[in-house]
Image: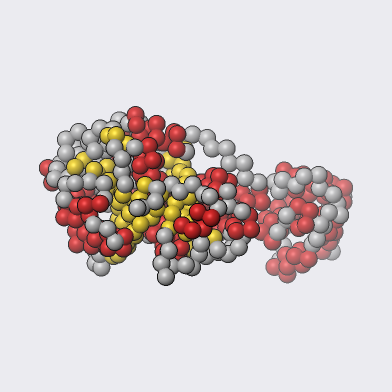
Amino acid sequence: MTRRVVITGCSAITPIGYGKEDIVKSLRHGVSGVKPLRDDGLLTEYIHSRVFGTVDYAIDYGFSRTFRKTMGPVAYYACQVAKDVLESSGLEQDFITSGRLGVSFSSTHGSPTVQRDIYKTFFSNSKKEFSSIGAVDYLKSMVHTTAVNITRMFGITGRVIASSTACTTSSQSIGLGYEMVKYGMQDAMLCGGADEYDTTTVAVFDNLLACSVDYNDTPEATPRPFDRQRDGLVVGEGAGILLLEELEHAKARGAEILGEVVGFASNNNGGDLILPNLEGITATLELALADAGISAAEVDFISAHATATKMGDVIEAQAIYDVYNERPLVTGLKSYMGHTMGACGAIELILTLYMMEQGFIAPTLNLETVDERCAMLRHTRGVTDRQTHIAAVQNFAFGGVNTCLLIANGLHE
Amino acid sequence: MMTRNEIQEKILAILTEDFEFDNPGLDDNLRDDHGFDSIDAIELLAKIEKMLGFTLERKEKEQAMSIRTINDILDYIEAMAASRKS
């Protein structure tokens, strides 16, 4: 038995805004959310990359202490977007607590802010300091902290999936949530991911020579996906969540259908844990089309992973060309906000949904001169008004994990 | 050694400011009336240790798990203080 899975709600906190109106405005006007890296009093002075995709606006959370006590910064993001979606969904409380609604949500590695404080205590080598480790530090920092803070806040009793696969964390969360509903395990799933401001992630990519370093004085000019002058990724923060629901369930309660998840694939390169792999990525894109039962010619738009690393963009461009030729428009949405890590798949899918609904496609920011090795694609070079019927959202992660999600604008006919 | 009134004043301040209790009453049920749970109990014990100025033994901490009201907390603190005095 397979069932159709529709999207009946979404919310995102991103470096280019919170909520549809802000985000669409930024996409239409080419606003970047990349800002100077903040000093964390630890590592920042040694990091070469001085830029970060930053959520620098205040969010009025209003969570009571009952919930705050188990939440690190990343869980605040997660619970806020979950609250947005549940409050606007119209779902009955009886359904929310019925066991038929699950959560598939995670982050790259829990809350690094809380983890750092725990390590500081460990390395202080003092009995007095040791006792300062709070009773809730683990709950705030564990890898599934986002998912279970969501279940706790809303009394959700269905399945919990916490896929922590670095940059494919939330695209896998969505894909696995889609499969839960498609195969009848759950009737609805809250799916997505979040990551908080974290300089240790910047340090890791910096040491791998993967971070952007040439635009420290002009943060908005980086990252530059597919551009000849790109020099690496920019780490970012944020959160994105989708409510996936079985089609008949959504129809029966008169829910607005924003889109349909028509296909998903995830595989592994089966070898190197860092280098992008053409065969692995190409296979993912083909597997997603097979899952959806559609041809490559039906896909109008591709949200590329496009981190702006030197090799990653070239391999992805080749994979897109091998599967789709030059037909669909391609945009690298990380050009607006950097790489939001565990949140990127969900955020990029939500941005794609917004653009589909509004009938436009935003261009890749900072794409001035296309790298000749990426030039065979149909890059979005300016705000383009057009109706998109089916879009592909591609994400790839350290560890050789690849994902591709295919979504339709409204119901797929 | 602090008087019971002094302990009460400090505990009420902690419960109101740190645990965000609304109008705490001395015989309120901590869990039912204020949503106080096992996580809160551990956090409160850390604050009680600071107040007493010494570290509680594991067995002593386990005794605290039967606390149900603010009056129970006050009894507990007095008993712990007295045990070190003797």
Please give the count of numbered marks on the rendered protein: 0
* Residue found at x 39% / y 51%: A411
Give the percent coordinates (x, y) of residue A325.
16, 50
Name the residue nearer the viewer: A280 or A37: A280
For residue A70, side relative to residue B17 (left or right): left
Look at the image and tell me in which quarter the N terminus of chain A lies: bottom left
* Residue found at x 69% / y 56%: B40
* Residue found at x 19% / y 49%: A317
Give the percent coordinates (x, y) of residue A111.
49, 52
* Residue found at x 38% / y 55%: A261
Give the percent coordinates (x, y) of residue A148.
55, 59
Give the percent coordinates (x, y) of residue A151.
57, 58
Q: Is residue A347 above or below residue A147?
A: above
Corner quadrant of residue A214:
top left
Asked if residue A80 shows in the view, the reply is no
Asked if residue B71 shows in the view, the reply is yes
Name the residue nearer the viewer: A207 or A68: A68
